[in-house]
Amino acid sequence: MTTRHVFFSFKNSSEAVNFVSYIQSKMRGKNINISVKGKKVKITLRASKQDLSLLLAMIKNEYKNWKLSTHGTKTGFYKHSIPRILHDAKLKTSIPINSIIDVLTLLGYPARIESGYIVTTMNFENVIKITEKISKKYRELLENAKYAPMARRLLAVVLSTFNWNDINQTTEKLINMDILSIDSRTSKITLSVAYEKALEKIKEMVKTHGNTRD
């Protein structure tokens, strides 16, 4: 067995503790010991030379993700690891990752998915809030069988973007805008237009009404 010590520094003790919690969840079952002193973290690894190299690479990769997400780039963009978002967010149910991109874009934040990251100008904490909000709305919509999958996805995005709570009222609003319709054969609520076209119409609503509560 070989022992290796790795040291990391953070902006403050809270950030250090959060990183430790994340690493512990990712490295569960591994032979590691972690200690925190102020804003510094010491990770002690014990493993065979081959396993040690793998463990070290994993930890350094997670630290890199943390830095990209926390400190961003000179152009103001952050790279948030999607696995980290899904780990940290308190999800009511699983959601399409692209729904996060849709809400961010509608709110005026450039956003895209790139090699397992969400690249955006919104900071990590607020991306987590958006993710949790979408998940909550998605869960509420899943409890009603009258919505077709893409209609459900769009409604979760709209409700999250505008901070609206009334699903029925929002549904009626989108039906009146010819974005949603009731399928005469199945009685399900479906999209009347392509999803991307629906998002364009919603974007016009954001410009007109902002994103205030109903």
Image: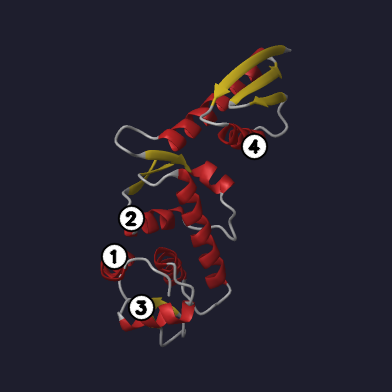
Q: Earlier in the sequence, mark 2 or mark 3?
A: 2
Q: Earlier in the sequence, mark 1 or mark 3?
A: 3
Alpha carbon separation for disc pair 1 and 3: 13 Å
User: Would you place residue 53 above or below residue 14 in this image?
Assistant: above
Residue carrying label 2: 105
Q: Which element carries disc 4, helix, strand or loop?
A: helix
Looking at the rendered structure, the kind of residue marked 1 is: Lys
Q: Are marks 2 and 1 in contact (CB under 8 Å)?
A: yes
Left or right, 18 with respect to 171, comes to: right
Residue carrying label 4: 21
Q: Which element carries disc 3, helix, strand or loop?
A: helix
Residue carrying label 1: 203
Alpha carbon separation for disc pair 2 and 4: 30 Å
Q: Earlier in the sequence, mark 2 or mark 1?
A: 2
Looking at the rendered structure, the kind of residue marked 3 is: Leu
Q: Which element carries disc 1, helix, strand or loop?
A: helix
Tell me the quarter of the picture where residue 206 sits: bottom left
Name the spot of residue 49 as percent of width and height, x first. Answer: 65, 13
Mark 4, residues whose alpha carbon is within 10 Å: few (<14), some, or many (≥20)?
few
User: Would you place residue 115 above or below residue 176 in this image?
Assistant: above
Looking at the rendered structure, the kind of residue marked 2 is: Thr
Tell me the quarter of the picture where residue 119 sits: top left
Alpha carbon separation for disc pair 3 and 4: 42 Å
The number of callouts visible is 4
Q: Quadrant of the N terminus?
A: top right
Alpha carbon separation for disc pair 2 and 1: 9 Å
User: Would you place residue 124 above or below residue 7 in this image?
Assistant: below
User: Which label sits on residue 174?
Assistant: 3
Looking at the rendered structure, the kind of residue marked 4 is: Ser
Please tell me which residue lies in front, 181 or 206.
Answer: 206
